[in-house]
Image: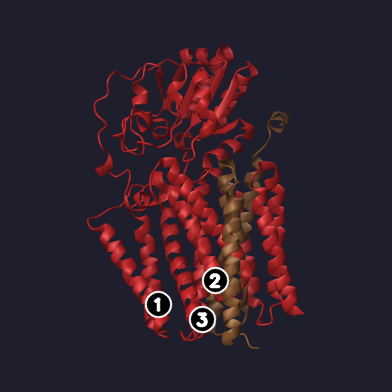
Chain colours: A brown, B red
Amino acid sequence: MPLDDPVVQKILLISALYVFALAAFLGYQVISRVPPLLHTPLMSATNAISGISLVGSIVTAGAQYNTVSTILGFIAVVCSTTNVVGGFVITDRMLKMFKRKEIVKKD
Amino acid sequence: MQFYFIEFSYLLASIFFILGLKGMSHPESAKRGMHLAEFGMLMAIIGTLVHHEIITYTWILAGLAIGSVVGLAMGLWVPMTAMPQRTALSHAFGAFAAALVGISEFYRFGGHLENRVMMGALGFEVMLGALTTTGSLLAFAKLQGMVRGTPMTYKGQNVFNMALLAVTIGIFIYLIVVPGSMPLFFTMVGLAFVFGLLLVMPIGSADMPVVMSLLNSYAGLASAATGFVLSNKVLIIAGTLDGFSGFILSILMCRAMNRSMTNVLFGAFGSATTAAASGAQDGTMREVGLDDIATQLAYANKVVFVPGYGLATAQAQHAVRELADVLEKRGVTVKYGIHPVAGRMPGHMNVLLAEANVPYSSLYELEQINPEFPTTDVAVVIGANDVVNPDARDNPGSPIAGMPILEVDRSKSVVVLKRGQGKGFSGLENPLFFKPVTGMLYGDAKDTLTRLVQAVQHA
C-alpha cells in the first residue's frame, strides 16, 4: 500500500497520536522527578535531545526534492547539529561540576 | 530490511532518550544517563543516513560538519554565567530548524497537502517554530544586554498582539479548510515571526526564567509537530518530552513567583507603572562593620548563604566558596539556600555554585532550608532582594504578596551584602533591610567577601 493511501494515512495519524499522548504522560512522570538542582542541565539536555529534528532535516537536505528544499534543509541541518553537539557537550560539562562533598575536599 | 533498520534505530534512540532523562533525577545518575542519550542520538543519525530518499550527501555532511564545529565551540567555551543566553539561542536554532523543515515540506507539495490533518500539523510546526525563533532571539539579546532588559510597553499592546495572533490563526484555519495558497502561507509565517518578537518585548529580565521555560516548551512542541508531518515517531517522542519539560518548568517558575502565566506574559512586571509604594518604612537601615560581621561568622554554629543574581553579576561565586571553606575549617556548618528563581533560568544558581566547587549536598531548596532559619546564627544575603522580602509573606497588599520567600528574617542575625541602597528588580522597598536583626554591608560582593575571608582568618 502506498504511503499516501487514505487508509494508511489514518493509521499513521492515530498511531502518532498514541505516541504523542503516551510520551506526554511519560514526560510528565519523568520530568517532575528532576530536582531543581538539575533544572539547568535538564533544559540543555532536553534541548539537545529535541535536536533530533536533525533526522528530518537530513532527509530534506539530501533528497533533492528541489533547490529551495535543499537549501532550507541544509540550514536546518546546521541549526539542529549545533543544538545536538552543543547541547550534549554543555550538559556533560555542567554535570561534571556537580560533585559530592568528599570529592570536592580531595580536589 | 532498510525500513526496519531505520525504525529500529529510532526505537532505540527513543528508549535511550527516556532513560537519559530518567537519570536526571540525581546528579550521580545524570552523567551516565546523558551518555545513553548521546548514544541514542548517534544511533538515530546513523539510521537516518541510510534513508532511501537521500540522493546526495554533500549538503548533509557539510551541514553536520559546520553544526558540529559551531556546537562544539559553543559547548566548550560558553561561560556558565552566559548559560541562559546560550539556551535562548539554542531554542531559536531548534525552532528555526523545525520551521524550515515545515516550510520546505509545504513548498515541496506546492501547497497542496491533500490531508487536512497534515496541514494542521504543518501549520502548528511552522507557526510555533517561527514565533519561538524570533522570541528566543529577542530573549537572547535581552539576556546578553544587547537590548535593554526592562519591559518595552506601549498603549494598546495587548490588544494589538491579540489581534495579530487572531489574524495569524485565522489564516491558519483558512489554509486547512482551503489548502493551496502559497502567498497566504508565507504571510502566516511572516506574522508568526513578528508575533514572537511582540510576545517577548513586554517581558522584563526578572521574568526571564518563565519565558525561557516557555520558549523551551514551544521549541519542543514544534519538533513534535514536525514528527506528525513526517510521521516520525522518535521526533514526536523527543519533541513531546522537551515540550513537557519546558511546560513543567514554566509552571514551577510561575509558582515560585506566585504569579499566573497570564500575568507574566502580559503584566509587564517591573516596569515603572507596577512599582507600587508599600507604605513608608519605619526605622533606618543599620550599616555594620566588616570586622563585626567577621567575628559573628567566625563564632557562629550555623551560617546560611542566600545568593541572588547579584552574586553572579559580581562574579563572586568563588569568593563565597572561599569564605565557606574558612568557616567550615573552624567547625561552622555552612549551607546555601537557593530560591527557584535565583538566576536567569531555572536552576541557574545551582550550576554557578557547583562551578565554584560548592558540593551539591550543601545546596538546599526553599522548602528544605526555610525550617532551618530559626536555628541559623547568621544568614548572609548576597545580591538577592525580592526573594527575601518579608512583605511577600506579611503584607497582603504587596505586589509580590504570596510569593514563596527564603525566610532569612527568622534567623538570629542577617547580613545583607548589597552594592548600594537601590531597590530590587520589582522596584519594591524591602522591609528586611529595616529590621533590627539586619545589618547592611555595602560594596562590591566579590571584594567584600574576599575581605571577609581575611578577617575571619584573623578572628
Badge 1 is on which residue? B186
Q: CA distance from mark 1 to mark 3?
A: 14 Å
Q: CA distance from mark 1 to mark 2?
A: 18 Å
Q: Is the Cβ of the residue at disc 1 closer than 8 Å to that at disc 2? A: no
User: Which secondary structure, mark 3?
Assistant: helix
**Pointer 3: residues within 10 angstroms few (<14), some, or many (20+)?**
some
User: Which secondary structure, mark 1?
Assistant: helix
Which mark's residue is nearer the viewer, 1 or 3? 1
The residue that appears at 46% across and 30% down in the rendered structure is: B406
Q: Position of B325 compared to B407: left or right?
A: right
Badge 3 is on which residue? A68
Query: Callout 1, which amino acid?
Result: Phe
Q: Quadrant of the C terminus of chain B?
A: top right
Q: Are marks 1 and 3 on the same chain?
A: no
Q: Residue furthest right?
A: B1
Query: Callout 2, which amino acid?
Result: Thr
Q: CA distance from mark 3 to mark 2?
A: 18 Å
Q: Nearer the viewer, residue B109 or B324?
A: B109
Q: Nearer the viewer, residue A3 or B355?
A: A3
Q: Does B416 appear above or below A9? A: above
Q: Position of residue B301 (x, y in %)?
A: 57, 15
Q: Position of residue B360 (x, y in %)?
A: 63, 35
